[in-house]
Amino acid sequence: MISRRKAGLVCAWVAALGMVAAASAGTALAQGAATYPDRQIRIIVPYPPGGSTDPVARLVAEELKNLWGQPVIVDNRAGAAGSIGTDAVAKAAPDGYTILFHTSVISTDPSFKRQTPYNVQRDLMPLMQVATGPYLLVTPPSFPVSNVRELIAYAKANPGKLNYGSAGSGSSGHLIAELFKLRAGIDMVHVPFRGGGPSIQAVMGGEIQVLFDTVSGSRSLAEGGQLKGLAVTSAERAALMPNTPTMAESGMEGGFEQVYWLGFFAPAGTPRDVAAKLASGISAAIAKPTVAARLRELGLLPRSVALSEFGKIVDEDIEKWRGVIRDAGIEPQ
């Protein structure tokens, strides 16, 4: 049986070891922050290659590699409407070497997804918003409306008879159309598709009458006459489509200014100086004239909003879409 004196010595020894370990960890953390980055950085994109998200991540990755002299790779972790890739970052070590590149759709996760293995506001740290972009409201060329005012009047005269499409339940196109329905006081039926491509094909073929798509996704079709572009959802006309009016100009009373954004997140707990260095590097990347020009070619507006300010945008969007989902009676999935 161990004596009290020996037990006390053991406890003191264990406590001393703990203090040494804590001091060593603190020193390592400080050194890591000072030397960051000293190895490969991985950017997880929770969508397949292609589209508008992946190319932007690759543009930034290349610039960060040139800036810091370390490999920066893009890892596409698609699946579960973005949840698989998001969860991988939420559970990653908070050291700045695994970060997430997502869209504003992440703001709908807390209210639309019943069960996710992560909590957006608890498990992720907003780093940098890098760009925003408007949606383009399109209809089939044969649809008998020429502006938003006429679309609203047609929908009110034919309640429940218009179909609008989206890339899937909970997608940005789904929720912005529901917000449009609420603001315009109209009734349309949602037809979800498995991705943006099928929804575009459906509106071209007249299977659906209304679609909110990205400018990069539908601009060429609208300009080529295969779709009818009624309006963009930004406050001002899109640079790539200067002849297409805004929603307000097209007859939406009170306006309808809604944009999506692209941004970077780190695991919660990432040291603030590491997060600040990441944000600074990303901001420098999108400020490059070649990168900014490419973003504009994709229908995006470069925009640097970092850390706490970006966090406020995320929080506000979470509350906005929670209200839309509730008011529209959308069932979480």
Image (spheres, rainbow, N blue to C red):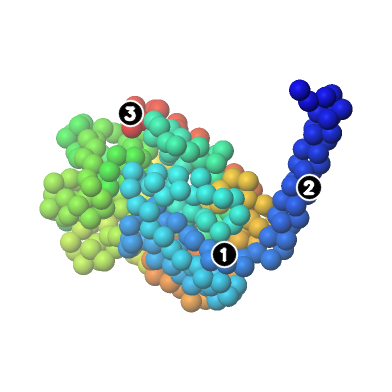
> Within 10 angstroms of label 1, few (less than 14), some, or many (20 or more) residues?
many
Work out which quarter of the rendered image holds the C terminus and state it: top left
Please name the amino acid that badge 2 sits on. Answer: Val
Q: Secondary structure at mark 1?
A: helix
Query: In the rendered image of this protein, does residue 206 appear above or below residue 110?
Result: below
Q: From where the camera sits, is residue 231 visible?
A: no
Please name the amino acid that badge 3 sits on. Answer: Glu
Mark-to-mark CA distance, 3 and 1? 37 Å
Along the horizontal axis of the image, is 144 left or right of 67?
Answer: left
User: Mark 2 — residue?
Assistant: 20
> Within 10 angstroms of label 3, few (less than 14), some, or many (20 or more) residues?
few
Along the horizontal axis of the image, is 15 left or right of 133?
Answer: right
| Residue at the image position 40 percent from the left and 32 percent from the top | 115
User: Mark 3 — residue?
Assistant: 331
| Residue at the image position 58 percent from the left and 54 percent from the top | 127
User: Mark 1 — residue?
Assistant: 282
